[in-house]
Amino acid sequence: MDEYSVAGVELYPYHLHRFWSSLVYESPPDRAEWEDHDAIERNIFTAMVEDVYKQGPAAIRKATQILRPHIHPQVEGLQEPRESEAQRGRPPKRANARDPSSFEHERARAEKRSKTNQSPRTPRSKTNQSPRTPRSKTPTGARKSQHMQVHNERNVCPYLRYVPPSIHPLVRGWFDPEPDGQCGFRAMSHAIHGDEGHYLQMRQDIITEVRNNWDLYKRVYLSRDGSLEAVVHRLDCRIAGRCTQEYWFEEADLLVFATMYNWAIIVYGLYGGRHTYGYTALPLTALEGVTQPSAVMALVFTGAHWVRLIVDDVDGVTPMPPFSPQWSHFRNMTSIPDWDLLYEQEQALYAILGGHYPNDDEESD
């Protein structure tokens, strides 16, 4: 058309291509149609949020981590507050110039609960129960009392023989869950929720995590369970109370819990029936921006029972055994390339105190 106009040639409709002459021009859509489009997007997002809720805590936590930088960009790049170097007076024991971590907060709560549970002894009223009454006939409340409380340092810990002797003075308390085959999940429930009663929910949470991230965990589980179906069968026990050995907590589950909650988990035990050992399980991977585990917890494994251990630090440093060989072999080097350097001071303190990890030479003795 420009060429015809420049050349001064008259333009008639039959000069136009049939395509252009057949176009039908419509007026632009009104505002109501755009508003309907916004409503459709809101409905899609609402449905997606409902799907995330159905996936369980692990999916909710990951979705929150993804959305938080977009909704609250001001929280990006936050770091631990710098410690004050100009404190006045002598600080109290274990004092520091920062907010307590989640593990320190949980430890303070455990101290408070243990003090609350300590009440003066009163004469026991007589009952019809004979000293020889079988444990199965004992009321449930009487059986639970010896496991539910968090024992403090005034008691004699019956599990110290599973802990390196150099760590004994640092043991401040322990939680002994019900030995019914659910003890590992009870101990994790107590550490995370402050109550061992959520152990069945802990099983469902770890099933969701393993199913959603099987590519990450399959090498950890294949050597023992063999397949995803076998792992889910062992974890999916929905009967409260005593369960058989096929549903027991396994050491491989520690790496999943460490990854789910971004915790460092220390395990103490015996090998050869006489040598103590310890190792640390760290998360296998981490979200972008996460630079270290958020808390540290300790467990004792007797070979058939799991117990949660509460250990003090030394001038703010918690003795930490070497890392689990499984963690060193299966971790995601892309997301956590240098996490093995995070606890050099803690592991050096553990070595100074005399802790060690079993090796082939010692096992052959």
Image: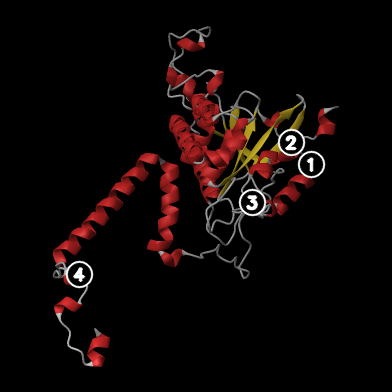
At mark 2, the secondary structure is loop
* First reached walking from the N terminus: tag 2 or tag 4: 4
Work out how far the residue at label 3 is from the one at label 4, CA to CA, in angstroms. Answer: 62 Å
Foreground pick, 170 / 38: 38
At mark 1, the secondary structure is loop
Residue 250 is situated, as x and y percent measured from the top left of the image, at 59, 29
Q: Amino acid at mark 1?
A: Gly
Answer whether labels 1 and 2 touch (C-beta < 8 Å). yes
Mark 1 Cα-neighbour bin, 10 Å: few <14, some 14–19, many ≥20: few
Work out how far the residue at label 1 is from the one at label 2, CA to CA, in angstroms. Answer: 8 Å
Work out how far the residue at label 2 is from the one at label 4, CA to CA, in angstroms. Answer: 91 Å
Q: Determine which residue is flagged by label 2.
A: 164
Residue 149 is situated, as x and y percent measured from the top left of the image, at 51, 31
Q: Residue at x 23, y 55 (%)?
A: 40
Q: Determine which residue is flagged by label 4.
A: 18
Residue 354, label in figure: 1
In the picture, residue 197 is in which quadrant?
Answer: top left
Q: Nearer the viewer, mark 3 or mark 1?
A: 3
Residue 11 is situated, as x and y percent measured from the top left of the image, at 17, 84
Q: Amino acid at mark 2?
A: Pro
Mark 4 Cα-neighbour bin, 10 Å: few <14, some 14–19, many ≥20: few
Q: Quadrant of the C terminus?
A: top right
Above or below, 270 relative to 81: above
Q: Determine which residue is flagged by label 3.
A: 333
Work out how far the residue at label 1 is from the one at label 4, CA to CA, in angstroms. Answer: 92 Å
* First reached walking from the N terminus: tag 1 or tag 2: 2
Residue 281 is situated, as x and y percent measured from the top left of the image, at 63, 41
